[in-house]
Image (cartoon, rainbow, N blue to C red):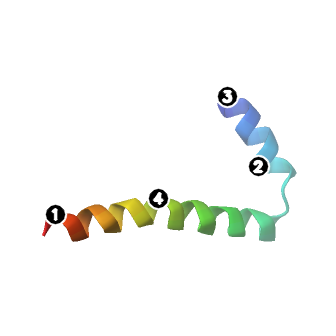
Amino acid sequence: MEVLMMKCVSSIPLRGLQKFINYVFKFIQLPFAMSLLFMH
């Protein structure tokens, strides 16, 4: 699974990779922010 991910990532251009990382970061950040809001 991880090897497949690495192959997919290595075939993506750098700009596309940055967009992908930003998307994943936002996707991870959203539930985290929501949980912080609901905890208080």
Residue closest to the eye, 40 or 10: 40
Q: Residues within 10 Å of mark 3 (few under 14, many from 20)?
A: few
The residue under the point 69% across, 62% down is: 20
Disc 3 from disc 2: Cα separation: 12 Å
* Residue type pointed to by label 1: Met
Disc 1 from disc 3: Cα separation: 34 Å
Disc on the earlier residue, 1 or 2: 2
Disc 1 + disc 2, Cβ < 8 Å? no
- The quadrant holding residue 5 is top right
The residue under the point 84% across, 56% down is: 12
Disc 4 from disc 3: Cα separation: 20 Å
Disc sitting over residue 28 in the figure: 4
- Badge nearest the viewer, 4 or 3: 4
| Residue 10 % position (x, y) | 81, 49
- Badge nearest the viewer, 1 or 4: 1
| Residue 21 % position (x, y) | 63, 63
Could you say whether the residue bearing mark 1 is in a helix, strand or loop?
helix
Disc on the earlier residue, 2 or 4: 2
The residue under the point 43% across, 65% down is: 29
Disc sitting over residue 1 in the figure: 3
Disc 2 from disc 4: Cα separation: 18 Å
- Badge nearest the viewer, 1 or 3: 1
**Which residue, given by chain and number where applicable, does mark 1 sit on?**
39
The residue under the point 67% across, 28% down is: 1
* Residue type pointed to by label 4: Ile
* Residue type pointed to by label 3: Met
Q: Residues within 10 Å of mark 2 (few under 14, many from 20)?
A: some
Disc 1 from disc 2: Cα separation: 35 Å
**Which residue, given by chain and number where applicable, does mark 2 sit on?**
9
